[in-house]
Amino acid sequence: MQVKAITLKVNGRTHYVALPPNVTLLRALRDLGYTDVKSGCEKGDCGACAVLLDGQAVNSCLVLAWQAEGAEIITNSGLGTMEHPHPIQEAFADTGAAQCGYCTPGMIISAKALLDRNPHPTVDEIREAIAGNLCRCTGYGQIIEAIQRASAMMGQ
Amino acid sequence: MYTAKPLPEVNLPPLRVVGKPLRRVDALGKTTGALVYAGDFSMPNMLHAKVFRSTQASARIRRLDVSRARALEGVVCVLTADDLPDAKLVTDMPGQTGQKQRKGSDAPVLAADRVRFAGEPIALVAAETLEQAERALELIEVEYEPLPGVFDPLEAMKPGAPVVYEPDNIVARWKIRKGDVEAGFAVADEIVENTFRVPFVDHAYLEPEAGVAWVDGRGVINIRVCTQVVEHFRSIARAVGVPHNKIHVQGTMLGGGFGGKEDITVEIFLALLAKHTRRPVKLVYTREESIQAHSKRHPFIITHRTGVKRNGRITAAEITMVSDAGAYPYLSPYVLLYATIASTGPYRVDNLKVDSVSVATNNPFTSAFRGFGAAQAAVAYEQQMDEIAKRLGLDRLEVRRVNYLKTGDRNTTGQVIRSAAWLEETATRVLEALGEKSEPPNEHVRIGQGFASYWQSYGRITWFHDTSRAWVGLELDGSAVIRCGVPDLGAGQVNSLCQITAEVLGVPLEEITIYSTDSALTPLAGTSTATRQLYMSGNAVYMAASNVRRVLLDRASKYFEEEPENLDLADGKVFVKSDPENALPLAELAGMCAADGLPLSNLALFRAPFTAKLDPENLRGDVFPDFTFGAHGVEVAVDTETGEVTLLKSVACHDVGRAINRAAVVGQIQGGSAQGIGYALMEEVQVKEGIIQTPSLSEYLIPTALDLPITQAFVLESGTGMGPFGAKGIGEPSLTPAAPAVANAVADALGVRIHSLPLTPEKVLAAVRGASEPESGEN
Ligand code: FES
Ligand code: FES
C-alpha cells in the first residue's frame, strides 16, 4: 500500500510519520505513544478513543490518520498532568468519576468539548454530550457530577 | 406509603480517614491519562500475536494446515496443538492451592482434533507487525467435519444427546434437603409456582484483554497483563511446562473485570509465544474477539414452587435450577453452588428442597460474572415473592417481612447468620424514597414501581481455605509503603488498603504508596473475586499496619514517658491523647526506631474461617464467611405502544458494614445498579446454534448515559461485617437486587409478568397484547 509522509500535531508537538492510507488516527496516536487514547472497539461504539480534532470531539478510530494531517489534535493527556491537572481532570478525580478509568480519557474529551461550547450545561445536556461514551463501571452518576463540578470550577 | 424502619443503635468508633469520600490514590493517574494499562505497554523488538479460532460450535478438525501462514513474510512463529502436547488449561478454582482439582475440569489450551464452541482457540501466530499477524490468520487452512452439537441445557440432559465431553453433560449437581417439604406443602394455604429465565450476558468491560510477555535474563517468563488473579502463574507454568517460579505475572490496573478476567485469558498464549520466540510478544484482543473469547454469565432456568400461609409465611419451597455451562466447565460448579445456596432469597424457609444442575452444551463457555449465580437466583426469588404477594393479595413488603432472615437464624444450608441482617431497614428506606407513583404523561404510558431485597455472600467458599497477605512499612521520612498482591479492577481495591493504613498509622493518604498485583514481588493476596479483597486483604493490611503501629507506640512511649494507650497517631505525627500539642513527627519516630533496630515493617497473613467441604447430595453447614443485605427499588414508565421501558427512579440501600471510602461505595452501588438495570432491560448475548449473534458493541448494548437515572444510594453501616472496621463487601451485592426490582416494576406497570429477561420492547408488547410469550412459566 502506498505510504505518505504526513504531519500530525498532537498536544502541541509535531510528528512526521509515514503511513499507509488505511491507518486510523487511533492507531497512529497510540503508536506515537499517546496511549491515553484508549481503544475499546475500533468501530465507533464506545467513545474511549475520543480526541479533540480542531476543537471537535471525534472518535479517533473513525478518522484516518491522513485526514488529521495538519489539524490540531488534543488528547486527554494534553489537557493537564498529575502535577497540573485540568479542572475537568481534577473534578473527575474528586467525585470518584474514574473507577477503572478506561473510559475516562474519552469521557473527559467529550466533557471538554461540551464545556467549551456550553460552559453551564444542564444535566440533560451533559447526558447528551457523553451519550457516545460508554462506561461500564460508574452508572454515569459521578461522571455527570464531575462535569457539573468542573463547570462550576471553570466558571469562577 | 412506607416509612423507614428506625435503625438499631450502633456505636461505631470515630475514625479519621476511613469512611471519608477522599480522592482515591489512583484517581489522578487515571484522569490525566498517566496510568499505563496492559495494552499500552510495548517493548523493543516486540512481536504481535493473534489467535486463530474455531468458526464451528461442534466439529472434528479434519485437517489443519499452517504452512502458508508460517511462510508469510514477517511471521516468526505459529503454534498449534501439535507443538504443545501437554498444554492443559486449568479452569478450576483460580489461584487456589492445596485443594484437589475437580476431575475433568481442564480444557485444552489449543484444540487438537475437536472443537466444542465457536471461538475455541486452534492456533497462535506471532509476527513482526500486527498487520502481518492478522494476514497470517487468513492463510491458516482448516477443514472441519461438523459433529452434532447441543445448544440447550434441557436437551443436553436427555439420553442420547450429543456428549460435549466425557463422561456426560452433567457438569455439577448440588442438593439441599431441609425439614419436611411434604408436610410444609400440606399446611400451605396456597402454592405458587413460576419458572424464570435469564440469558447469557457479557461483561463488556471497556478494556479488552491485553498483555505483553518476555523472557528475561534469568529465564523467567514475565507477563504484564490485566487479570483478576495473579496466582494464575501456577496454572500458566503448568500449561507452558516450566516450574512455578519461572512465571512472573505483573498485573496492571484493570480497565474493568466483573469476573470476565477471573479465568485465564491471554496469559498462556503470551507465555508460549515468548518462550518459543525468545522475543517480547504483545497480544491485545479486539472487541469482537473479547466477546468471543471470554466467559459469559450463565443462563439459568429456575423454577420455584412455594407453599405459603395466608399471612405470607413460607411453609415449604421446592426450587430447581438449570444452568448452561457452555463448552467447558470453568467455574460453573461454583456459580451453581452460589445460586443454590442463595436460591430462597433472604427468607427463612424451614422445609426446603433444592436441586440444581449445570449442564455442558456447545454454547460459549460460562463462568464468573459479578453476582456469581446469586444474581440469577435473585431474579427468580424476588419475582416469586411478588407473585406470592399478588396471589395472597398482600402488600409486597409485608410478604417479605414475615419471612425475612434475622441475625441468629439459620440459612439454606443451616449456617447461622451472625452479622446484622438489615432487610426491613433497607427495604423501607428504598420504598420511602420511591414515594408516590409519578403521574403518567399520557394514556399510553403506565407507571410501575418495584423493589427487591437480597442477600449475598462476600468472601470465598470457606472450604477453599482462603488466605491473603500484605506487607506494610514506614519509611524514614514518615511516608508509608504497602506491598500487597491485590489486583485492582477499578473498584478501589488498592485505595481502600491505603485508607486503612492511613487510619492505623496516622500517615496522610497522599503519603502512602502501594505496590500491588505482582505474583513475585508483592505478597500474594488472592483473587479479586467473590467480593473478597476488602474483607481479606483489608484485614491483612490492617494486621500488618497494626503490628507496625505497636512498634511505633512502644518506642514513642519511652520518648513521651507515657503508656502506649495514651498515645495516638494522626496527621503524620505521634502525640499524647490528652495533650495533642505534645507531638513528634512520624519521621523522627521512625528514625528513633531505626536507630534501635526495631522493625518498621510487617508481613501479615489473614486466614478466612476454614470449613470442611460439604456433601453435594445435601449441603449442610457453613459455606461462606458472611453475607451482605440490602434492597433496590425502581420506578418505571412502560410505553404500551412501543414497548419501551424507561427508568424514572432508582434507589438502592445496602448495609455495607462500614464504608472505607464513601464515594467509592456510592460508585460501586451506582455502577452495580447500572449493570443490573442493563441485565433487566437490554443485555443479552444472543446465541444461535452456538454462534454469537451479537458480536460487537453495536449489537450487544449496554446502558448509556441516556438510559439511566442516577441511582440514589443509601449507605448504612451496621459495623457488623468481618472486614476491617466491621466492613462487609459491596462490589457484587450492588448489582444483585437491581434486575429483579426492574422486573417487578414492569410487572407492576403491566399487571402481568414476563418470565424471562431481558424485558425487551418485543416482550413487553407481547405482554401488553396478552399474547402468550414463549416459554411462559405462569400457571
Ligand atoms: S475505540 Fe473508537 S469508539 Fe470505541
Ligand atoms: S470507569 Fe471503568 S469504564 Fe468508566
Image: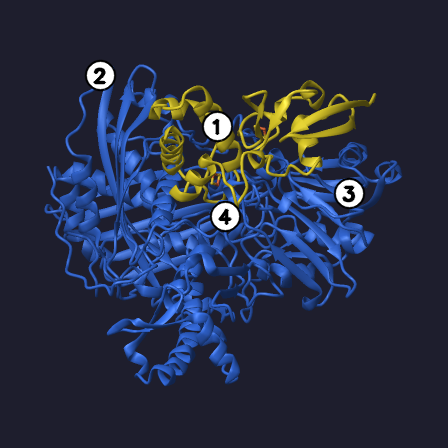
**Residue at the front extreme, as displayed:** B581
Q: Position of residue B664 (x, y in %)?
A: 38, 48
Identify the element where label 2 is drawn: loop
Nearer the observer: mark 1 or 2; the answer is 1
Q: Amino acid at mark 4?
A: Val
Dots 3 and 4: beta carbons under 8 Å?
Answer: no
- Estimate how packed mark 2 is, as few (under 14), some (14 to 19) or many (20 or more) residues with alpha carbons within 10 Å: few
Q: Which residue in the structure is indicated by mark 2?
A: B441
Identify the element where label 3 is drawn: strand
Nearer the observer: mark 2 or 4; the answer is 2
Dots 1 and 2: beta carbons under 8 Å?
Answer: no
Q: Are marks 3 and 1 on the same chain?
A: no
Q: Which residue in the structure is indicated by mark 1?
A: A112
Q: Amino acid at mark 3?
A: Val
Identify the element where label 4 is drawn: strand
Q: Which residue in the structure is indicated by mark 4?
A: B359
